[in-house]
Amino acid sequence: MFIITCPYCGPRDQSEFAYAGEAHRTRPADPAALSDTDWADYLFARSNEKGVHAERWVHAAGCRRCFNALRNTATDRFLAFYAIGTPKPEVTEATPETPCGEQIGSGNDAIKVERPAADGTGDSSVDGAGDRP
């Protein structure tokens, strides 16, 4: 369960909110002038960042207003909430890493845990990597 802080109503349960896409995307001034490829990029291409990401949310079961949020997509931790039209706040958060040095959320983390070699040589390997052809 997440607690999401609506800038207008205050903290509420996530069940009151709906995700509304990537924040800070501006509709093209003249969509008819765009090529099909450019229009498709605007409609469907998203940055899909790992780490801190600006998102738009709507308080669907409350004030029904949209707002922006900064969320770390690797940890699902919300870092800031702010009204649309206000500048994006500066936040710093390091994404935690697995023992292999990869960021959390980079795939199946259970498989990417370093294990000492069974023969005691001190060499480590990625768990499961030797099982692959």
Image: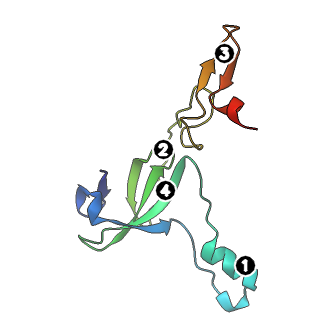
- Real-space Cα distance between discs 3 and 4? 47 Å
- Real-space Cα distance between discs 2 and 4? 9 Å
Residue 17 in the image: above or below residue 106: below
Task: Residue type at mark 2: give it.
Answer: Val
Residue at 38% over, 55% down? 81
Callout 1: SS = helix
Judge the density around disc 4: few (<14), some (14-19), many (≥20) Cα neighbours within 10 Å. Answer: some
Callout 2: SS = loop
Disc 2 + disc 4, Cβ < 8 Å: no
Judge the density around disc 1: few (<14), some (14-19), many (≥20) Cα neighbours within 10 Å. Answer: few
Disc on the earlier residue, 2 or 3:
2
Q: Is residue 87 visible?
A: no
Disc on the earlier residue, 3 or 1:
1
In the rendered image, which quarter contains the C terminus? top right
Q: Which residue is mark 2?
A: 91
In-image side of 68 versus 47 (left or right)? left
Q: Which residue is mark 3?
A: 117
Residue at 58% over, 28% down? 113
Callout 3: SS = loop
- Real-space Cα distance between discs 1 and 2? 31 Å
Q: Which residue is mark 1?
A: 38
Residue at 68% over, 33% down? 131
Count every numbered label the image shows and give the total: 4
Task: Residue type at mark 3: give it.
Answer: Ala
48 vs 52, nearest the viewer: 48
Residue 4, disc: none
Q: Which residue is mark 4?
A: 88
Percent coordinates x, y for residue 119 in the rendering: 68, 10
Q: Is residue 118 visible?
A: yes
The quadrant where residue 99 appears: top right
